[in-house]
Amino acid sequence: MTGRGIDQILPQPCDPILYETYATSALHYVQLAEEATGPIPRQVGASYVWGAALNELNRTPADARIINLETSITRSATFEPKGINYRMSPENARCLSAAGVDCCVLANNHVLDWGRSGLLDTLTSLNKLKIKFAGAGRDLAQASAPAILDAGSGTRIIVFAFASVTSGVPRSWAATQEAAGVNLLTDIADASVAQIGEQVKVVRRPGDVIIVSIHWGPNWGYAIAHDQIRFAHALLERAPISIIHGHSSHHPKAIEVYQNRVILYGCGDFLNDYEGIGGYRQFRDDLVLMYFAEIDPATGDVVALEMVPLQLRRFQLVPPSIGDVDWLLRSLDRESRMFGSRVELQPDGRLTLCWGQRESLTRFRSTRRRSLRP
């Protein structure tokens, strides 16, 4: 969520005007963060917000870096009257390149915050930055088309993206044959499973790695609806999907491994401007995770999943304290146990997901093939 307050500290921000009942200026969120954690520099470089995450990106080279971009890239003044509107300037979108982002998922409830003109500006900016996207487009054909990334050695990474109405995406945002919009899921029933399965079948070639990214569910709370679980399982049973990349929750949720495929029910935010905002402190949305998935392209199985804990302070990612890492470890382990998964702390400070009768981490490291980062 690189818009609103974060956009204001970057070199060329949008007009800070907002149309919220809570704030009329994006600078208000900068002020709240400064009151909570200290002064924040202005006109920072494009890499500032990523902070310590850049060290981890350099430490573990990957075939793909995939994010859910939950903001519009535009200077459009045509806002949607929905209460909260995120945007960042096209000039400040260079921060995405600073992190080497390869693909932006756009199927979410903020990409049209500044109207369809704002979405079209977003697509133009990503094309200029040579960043691929999925989940929204100029029409239904583009919005439903997957992003295709070349991982080398004949392997492609195929990213399908969907926005579910359960995350608050307005039905009017759905792309049509004539109008720009998002790739909308109006339900998570059997018909949708069949539809997605057929889309995967049409595009997939042997050796492809398939990721399905879904914006679903509420922002807060650890509960996962039975319908979500059933839908995720049905997808993995029907199509050779390696990762279900779930997002919408502002904090990390449970992780499940089903048939050797990973379901991230809620990745949590990675960047936001929430410092100083009260109300949901018990979920510690200031503590975030980077996800490093190792996938065998021959089978599509996920053979290892590591996570790097970080903390948001002054709109920048920094290393968390030992106590904060322990809190995140216990929370994620508690929620994932219900799905037969465990989370363990490694000597290097990373978290590792364990499941089933999984062999030692050393064995898995010796068989690594591909590294993906949603």
Image: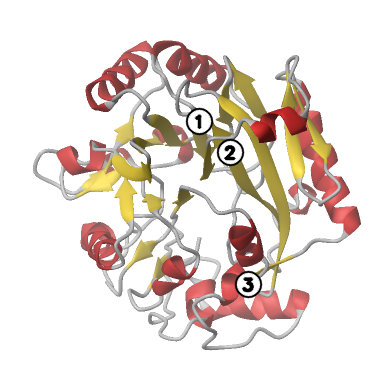
Do labels 2 and 3 touch, CB within 8 Å?
Answer: no
Q: In this picture, is 331 found above or below 28?
A: above
Seen from the viewer's position, the closer of residues 119 and 370 is 370
Residue visible at 41% across and 19% down in the picture: 240
Distance from Cα at disc 2 to Cα at disc 3: 26 Å
Ranked by sequence position, the earlier of labels 2 and 3 is 2
Do labels 2 and 1 touch, CB within 8 Å?
Answer: yes
Q: Is residue 166 visible?
A: yes
Seen from the viewer's position, the closer of residues 79 and 130 is 130
Amino acid type, label 3: Phe
**Residue bearing mark 2:** 293
Distance from Cα at disc 2 to Cα at disc 1: 9 Å
Q: Is residue 223 visible?
A: no
**Residue bearing mark 1:** 243
* Label total for image: 3
Distance from Cα at disc 3 to Cα at disc 1: 29 Å
